[in-house]
Image: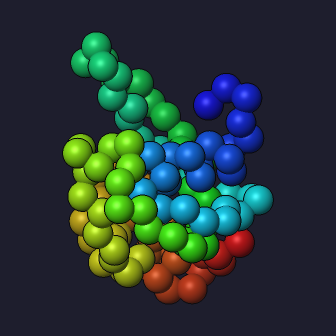
């Protein structure tokens, strides 16, 4: 996001996509490789940084509510359902205590 730091962009994404508000870690807790799908149907490789967010509020209405359903999982549960293998490994490390929450 132009004009925003990576942690600030993570906060905005969390609010827009999941309707959650909170304080974000200054440093990423990890990253994962994936493919970003664009509106024109093309996809390109991407490296996504993952930031810890201490949630302080859940919104009843948010930008992408009609496109998404908010549901909470433990890191281990999330690791078993995500599509990106690198993200699953990061979540497994978090569940096992090998990835610290910054």
Asked which quadrant contains residue 43, the reply is top left
Q: Can I make out residue 87 in this image?
A: no
Pick whichever, 32 or 23, lies toward us: 23
Q: How is the image coloured?
A: rainbow
The percent coordinates of residue 58 (x first, y second) are 44, 68
The percent coordinates of residue 50 (x first, y second) are 57, 56
The residue lying at 24 percent from left, 44 percent from top is: 67
Pick whichever, 102 or 90, lies toward us: 102
Asked which quadrant contains residue 9, the reply is top right
The residue lying at 52 percent from left, 77 percent from top is: 94
Asked which quadrant contains residue 6, the reply is top right
The residue lying at 38 percent from left, 50 percent from top is: 62
Above or below — where is 19 with respect to 3?
A: below
Spot the residue most to the bottom.
96
Pick whichever, 75 or 71, lies toward us: 71
* Quadrant that contains the N terminus: top right
Above or below — where is 56 with respect to 17?
A: below
The residue lying at 33 percent from left, 44 percent from top is: 64
| Left or right side of 57 for 66 | left
Spot the residue most to the front.
60
| Left or right side of 16 for 4 | right
């Amino acid at each position: 996001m132009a004009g925003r730091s990576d942690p600030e962009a993570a906060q905005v994404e969390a609010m827009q996509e999941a309707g959650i508000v909170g304080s974000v870690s200054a440093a990423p807790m990890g990253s994962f490789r994936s493919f970003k799908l664009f509106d024109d149907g093309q996809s390109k490789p991407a490296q996504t940084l993952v930031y810890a967010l201490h949630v302080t509020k859940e919104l009843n209405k948010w930008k992408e509510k009609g496109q998404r359903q908010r549901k909470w999982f433990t890191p281990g549960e999330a690791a078993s359902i995500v599509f990106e293998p690198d993200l699953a490994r990061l979540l497994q490390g978090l569940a096992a205590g090998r990835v610290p929450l910054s």
